[in-house]
Image: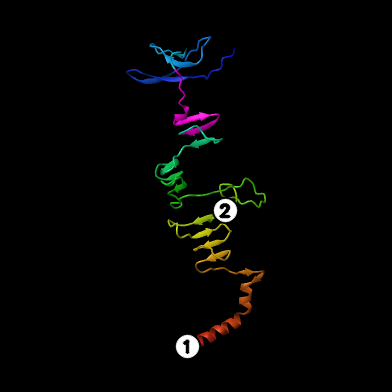
């Protein structure tokens, strides 16, 4: 029989009057071990594998451990679910940061953003360029032509089907009742307002060099009719002075 056990090396700290040092110690294993084994230490400090007392009952506590490892997958707060390689347990109805990278003040974090259910929340807090918060960067691996966008925001329902009941994307500034930009489930775009009728609706002025409507340049039309436009403007001004 070939015995296969993990090689375990421990570091034991020794302290004397002048200094301290670490010494590596390896537990010994008998030639014919009886499983299961436990790691024991004798009065003289010798480590060894010993048979587990038959009068004791082995109780698995893996399900309750705050940190677990299974089949190459890591779980914090529970055994990793499904096929997740890294899984952090976060409760509902609890405003909680589950994951954070940073210095404690600035950084990137993810967690539950509400005390009422579960709202996935991503937060970026930064103090650079200048005091930037959160960057989304997609970097292509080549310069080949492609029709696939580098960054995709995909809204769908729980059946992985097209949304029909709510907008897909909104951009706001601390006001969920007024969006600076809104893309609804029909693909209509609202800038400063909710799109209601047209493909693009804007609450405010639009500045552009030209508008092309069914292949016709509005700028060219204005240029060709500029003389008539100027004459009409002068007539309107004259009528206003007469009043």
CA–CA distance in space, label 1 to label 2: 56 Å
At mark 1, the secondary structure is helix
Q: Which residue is rendered at x = 55% and y = 30% of the image?
A: 72
* Closer to us: 61 or 70: 61
* Closer to us: 213 or 208: 213
Q: Would you name the residue on which mark 2 appears?
A: 163
Q: Which residues are magenta?
A: 57-76
The answer to whether residue 58 shows anywhere in this view is yes
**Vertical order, 197 against 51 (above or below):** below
Coordinates of residue 233 in the picture (x, y in percent): 54, 83
The answer to whether residue 26 shows anywhere in this view is no
Q: Would you name the residue on which mark 1 appears?
A: 241
| Disc 1: CA contacts within 10 A as few (<14), some (14-19) or many (>=20) | few
* Closer to us: 166 or 50: 166
Residue 94 bears which disc, if any? Answer: none
Q: Which residue is rendered at x = 40% and y = 42% of the image?
A: 104
Residue 73 within the magenta-colored segment of the rendering: yes
Coordinates of residue 1 in the picture (x, y in percent): 59, 12
Circle nearer the N terminus (1, 2): 2
Coordinates of residue 103 in the picture (x, y in percent): 41, 41
Within the image, what quadrant is residue 215 found in?
Answer: bottom right
Q: Is residue 30 left or right of residue 149?
A: left
Residue 69 within the magenta-colored segment of the rendering: yes
Q: Is residue 42 left or right of residue 140?
A: left
Q: Which residue is rendered at x = 37% and y = 20% of the image?
A: 20
């Amino acid at each position: 029989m070939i015995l296969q056990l993990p090689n375990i090396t421990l570091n034991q700290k020794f302290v004397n009057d002048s200094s301290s040092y670490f010494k590596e110690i390896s537990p010994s294993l008998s030639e014919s071990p009886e499983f299961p084994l436990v790691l024991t230490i004798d009065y003289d400090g010798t480590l060894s594998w010993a048979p587990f007392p038959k009068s004791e009952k082995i109780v698995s506590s893996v399900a309750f451990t705050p940190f677990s490892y299974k089949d190459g997958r890591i779980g914090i707060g529970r055994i990793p679910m499904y096929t997740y390689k890294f899984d952090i347990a976060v409760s509902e109805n609890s405003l909680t940061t589950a994951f954070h990278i940073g210095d404690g003040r600035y950084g990137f974090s993810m967690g539950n953003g509400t005390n009422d259910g579960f709202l996935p929340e991503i937060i970026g807090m930064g103090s650079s360029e200048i005091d930037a918060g959160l960057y989304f960067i997609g970097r292509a691996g080549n310069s080949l032509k492609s029709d696939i966008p580098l960054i995709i925001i995909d809204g769908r329902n729980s059946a992985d089907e097209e949304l029909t009941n709510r907008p897909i994307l909104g951009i706001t500034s601390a006001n969920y009742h007024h969006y600076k930009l809104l893309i609804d489930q029909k693909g209509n775009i609202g800038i400063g307002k909710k799109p209601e009728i047209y493909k693009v609706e804007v609450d405010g002025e639009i500045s552009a060099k030209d508008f092309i409507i069914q292949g016709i340049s509005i700028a060219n039309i204005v240029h060709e009719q500029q003389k008539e436009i100027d004459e009409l403007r002068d007539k309107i001004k004259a009528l206003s002075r007469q009043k």
